[in-house]
Image (cartoon, rainbow, N blue to C red):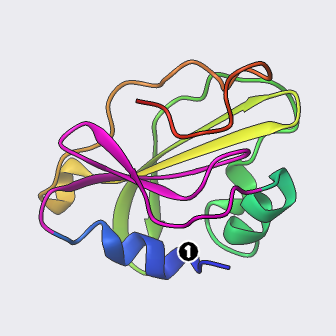
């Protein structure tokens, strides 16, 4: 399973705007607004929680449904913008570099994942 710090390191790559960790989809990156899977396996809600457990992102995982709001979070002294959405048992975590770190932040909060949505990455 991916480690949060490895995933945050990917945000330093040229052209990577966002890392997306979500239930029912592989871990993906956004490059120029296009999602590209990093892994082949789709994640369960427990696997999504496990990636952020015992990190500054862990407390952001909501216990009830929410569309998520951008939040500034410090991880190892670096600022990141994080959006955490929940719809029933589906979780979506979007990670981006903070504009104060010199890179673009994720776009405005996306609607919470729908239980009826396809299990593949979003376009």
Residue 70, horizontal then vertical, whole percent: 46, 35
Residue 87, horizontal then vertical, whole percent: 78, 26
Residue 100 falls within the magenta-colored stretch: no
Q: Nearer the viewer, residue 103 or 87?
A: 87
Q: Nearer the viewer, residue 17 or 44?
A: 44
- Tell me: residue 21, above or below residue 113: below
Quarter containing the C terminus? top left
Quarter containing the N terminus? bottom right
Residue under label 1: 4
Give the quarter of the image for residue 42: bottom right
Q: Give the magenta-colored segment's residue range.
A: 14-43
Q: Nearer the viewer, residue 100 or 118?
A: 118
Residue 23 falls within the magenta-colored stretch: yes
- Tell me: residue 12, above or below residue 114: below
Q: Is residue 94 left or right of residue 42?
A: left
- Tell me: residue 46, above or below residue 17: below
């Amino acid at each position: 399973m991916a480690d949060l710090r490895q995933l945050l390191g990917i945000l330093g790559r040229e052209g990577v705007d966002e890392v997306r960790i979500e239930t029912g989809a592989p871990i993906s990156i956004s490059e120029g607004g296009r999602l590209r899977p990093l892994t082949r396996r789709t994640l369960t809600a427990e696997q999504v929680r496990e990636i952020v457990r015992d990190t500054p992102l862990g407390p952001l995982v909501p216990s009830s449904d929410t569309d998520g709001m951008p939040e500034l979070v410090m991880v190892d002294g670096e600022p990141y913008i994080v959006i955490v959405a929940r719809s029933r048992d589906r979780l979506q975590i979007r990670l981006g570099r903070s504009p104060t770190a010199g890179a673009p932040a994720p776009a405005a909060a996306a609607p919470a994942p729908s239980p009826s949505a396809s299990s593949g990455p979003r376009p």
